[in-house]
Image (cartoon, grey):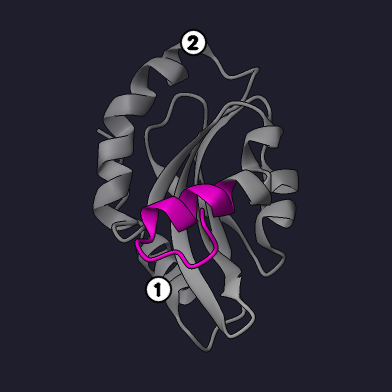
């Protein structure tokens, strides 16, 4: 089991979800290579492009992000995504625990539209994620 008991995790989650907050992503990392305790290592206001830069290729991490996109000229939507990052240089034992730990993370970062598994930073390009969010979001007036 992953230890997600740090109260800062829930605080950062609520901050990303808050309508009046500019914070639009958070990043959870393991305290050390041998630890199963997760902690908030960064938050940001620069969207997925900023989050991509914060990811470490040698780590496994979890991120939660608010994505804002336009459906048409008249409206904007905000959706939340859960990102499970396994960097290309992540150690084998850490990779092996990710599927079990993801369930524990989902208990805390509980409200999201889609889960995005990411193995390289290009997996977090905004356009393909927005396409997936539109498909998951129900009514679409632009043919997606």
Residue 118 got which mark?
Answer: none
Q: Is residue 90 left or right of residue 12?
A: right
Q: Quadrant of residue 69?
A: bottom right
Report the front residue among 32 and 41.
Answer: 41
* Secondary structure beneath label 2: helix
Residue 14 got which mark?
Answer: 1
Of callouts 2 and 1, which one flags the residue occurring earlier in the amino acid sequence? Answer: 1
Residue 64 forms part of the magenta stretch = no
Report the front residue among 6 and 142.
Answer: 142
Which residue: 63% across, 35% down? 123
Q: Quadrant of residue 45?
A: bottom right
Residue 96, x across and y down, in percent? 38, 15
Residue 60, x across and y down, in percent? 53, 30
Range of residues picked out in magenta: 129-144
Q: Quadrant of residue 21?
A: bottom right
Residue 144, x across and y down, in percent? 51, 53
Q: Is residue 17 above or below residue 132?
A: below
């Amino acid at each position: 089991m992953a230890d997600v008991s740090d109260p800062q995790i829930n605080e950062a989650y609520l901050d990303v979800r808050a309508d009046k907050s500019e914070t639009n992503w958070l990043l959870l990392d393991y305290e050390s290579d041998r630890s199963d305790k997760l902690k908030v290592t960064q938050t940001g206001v620069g969207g997925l492009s900023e989050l991509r830069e914060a990811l470490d290729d040698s780590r496994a991490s979890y991120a939660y992000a608010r994505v804002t996109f336009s459906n048409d000229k008249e409206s904007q939507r905000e959706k939340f995504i859960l990102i499970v990052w396994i960097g290309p240089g992540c150690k084998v034992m850490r990779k092996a625990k990710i599927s079990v730990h993801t369930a524990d993370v989902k208990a805390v970062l509980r409200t999201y539209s889609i889960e995005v598994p990411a193995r390289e930073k290009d997996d977090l390009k905004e356009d393909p994620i927005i396409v997936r969010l539109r498909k998951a979001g129900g009514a679409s007036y632009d043919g997606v």
